[in-house]
Amino acid sequence: MIFININGIALNVKPNSTVLQACNNLNINIPKFCFQENLEIAGNCRMCLVEIKNSPKPVASCATPVIEGMHVFTDTPLVKKARESVLEFLLINHPLDCPICDQGGECDLQDQTLYFGTDRSRYFELKRAVEDKNCGPFIKTIMTRCIHCTRCVRFANEICGIDNLGTTGRGNKTEISFYLNNIFKSEFSGNVIDLCPVGALTSKPFAFKARSWEIKKKQTIDILDGIGSNIIVQTFNNNIIRILPKVNKDINIEWITNKTRFFFDSIKYQRINEPLIKTNDSFKPITWERVFNIIKQKTTQFDPSNQNAVIGNLIDLKSLFTFKQFLNNIGINKFEYKTEFNYNNNTIISSDIMCESTFKLKLKDLSKCDLCLLVFCDPRKEGSILNLHLRNTFKKHNLEIFSIGSKLDLTYPVKNLGLNILNLIKILEGKHSFCQKILSSKNFIIIVGSNIYNIPNGINILKSLYNKFQNKINILQLESGFLNFLEIFHKKKNYKESNKLTFLYNTDNISILSNDNYKIYIGHHFTQDAQNSNLILPSTTFLEKNSYFLSTDGIIKKSIKTLNKNNNIKNDYNLFQNLNYFINESQDYIIFDKLVQQKKVNNEIFYKNNIESIFIDSKIIKPLVNIPYKTNILEKHSKILMNSLKNENTLNNFII
């Protein structure tokens, strides 16, 4: 530790810390524009100036390392005058158009000018103007507002792997620009909107929608992939107008993909808002009472052996759990998972493989690895946050990455071992030169893409990988709905044309269905399957209910309701409970909420830790659905639980 003195307060700090970090430890507010803790230090805004004893002039605290015996002063007249001068220079060419700026109310320049700036201007010359740049369909640019903090430049270079964005010109001619006429081509490009401390880079979809003080905010998770990024959903008049990342250093750090950030428009369009029935090739609205009577009639009309269910993506554990109880109570025992990701229809996935269908390695532990093999996996498309962690590990810890399959552009070097599966077989047999790399590696991992299920004999190859490498195998699932399906339904079964009644749960474009089947569609959007169905039941999206989703690393996380649903739409969970009771009045069924409220079953099954993630011990679900599953989920996190339970008062933090 190093001893320093800040404003007369003695403090011990770690070596290699900066003065800014030391001030943060004392909760001393140091204004800054260019500094961002997840980016490299630039030190070019000069806003974080502090005075150091025996120094002839103020120094930038973000770029100054601490020295033994250093005396730092953050509130002297010299420091105040320096901050006023810096802000005066920054505002010389700023257009001062706060009333029409979307950054108003969230602008660092506004806030710091109020607290640290002067109350008048001495500049009366003409302001300069800068041409706006075309950064693509998401980023709105007004470059005259730019203060050249270079956050966007460093983010593009360090996080996105884009090296053609930088500063051009000198002095009063300096601009942030692409060296060639190009748009910001990256799956993380929308994050520069959050990084920009002024209104130079704002969101095009958010433009003129609402002011920051009118917005309601709720924290939840993203389910569009299996990663489970933490997000903040902002609503205005029960409409989502913006989605922002929530800081979680163990998962998504503080970044989210463009898909997560801008998908919310799809929630409003082609929604199913009431029950519909097909008559003469057209749909007509009907009452819920008639819907229940039709379903009861159809389920009793056909033998259970001629009924089945096909399940799609984006469905939560709670709804699937109740849906399975409903199907079992009416005698249906044939289930299949089907979405746009075309799993091989002839493949029956066995339980010993499916119980290992998640990541065994936590994303934060990737930094401990020194060798990685990607097997038919494109993490940049299948799990962009995982690709971000791989890139960080490559840059900071010299991770070597090899791949089998198509050549990939992952923004970092990847050595391709071949295009076909024969190279993987050679590795399993120990006849490939890559085996020498494995032997010399201290912490080797294999990441298998979910496309392995589509490859002929892919399941057998996956079994061979498990037998050979065991705990080194990590499967990256493309869809969170598939993980939830495997957790509840255990495995998928083949579809038979003999079925006369089919339940379609949030599916899209199931081409194998016969026109003779009576199809009941349950979902929230009017997909191709909904158009081909005989009866349509509206359901809620994941943002319109509280529920649980299994992430690719085996953690069950809670999603929070952020929108109010249409009054004529039933919650999936309540819908299946009502159907269950309506068709089988005397049939007992387990209530999911009561199940998870049993605090004394398998110790405490719910708890909340520092990163706002919620875990459930899978043993509590296992006896009910009779599926094998990894039993060490709670064991891995028991240390976190015990550390949080230092006194009885922390029991109030449990989310039950």
Image (cartoon, grey):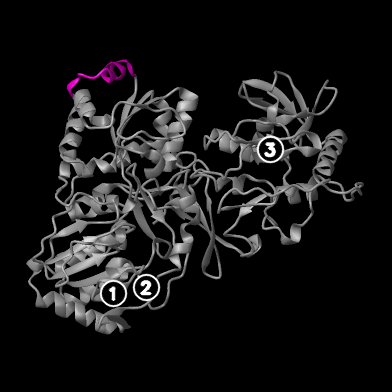
Q: Mark 3: which secondary structure?
A: loop
Find numbered disc 1 in the image and state the secondary structure of the residue it sits on.
strand
Mark 2–mark 1 contact, CB under 8 Å? yes
- Image position of 441 with respect to 238: above or below: above
Question: What's the residue at 35%, 55% (across, down)?
Answer: 548
Which residue position holds label 3? 34
Query: Residue 210's image quarter?
Result: bottom right
Measured in 3D between alpha carbons, the distance from the residue under mark 3 to the one under mark 2, in whole angstroms, is 46 Å
Amino acid at pointer 3: Cys
Question: Label 1 crowding class (10 Å Cα cut-off): few <14, some 14-19, many 20+?
Answer: many
Residue type at tag 1? Ile
Q: Visible in this render: residue 632?
A: yes
Say which residue appears at 17% left-offset and 71% top-offset.
515
What stretch of residues is rendered in magenta? 429-441
Per the image, the residue denoted by label 1 is 536
**Residue 527: percent from left, percent from top:** 33, 66
For the point 46% across and 70% down, the residue is: 564
Type of the residue with mark 2: Ile
N-terminal of the pair, mark 3 or mark 1, is 3
Query: Pointers 3 and 2 in contact (CB under 8 A)?
Result: no
Q: Is residue 268 left or right of residue 500?
A: right
Q: Residue at x 30, y 26 (%)?
A: 417
Main SS class of the magenta portion in the image? helix
Q: Which mark is residue 594?
A: none
Task: From the image, tell me which residue sits under label 2.
Answer: 272
- What element does badge 2 sit on? loop
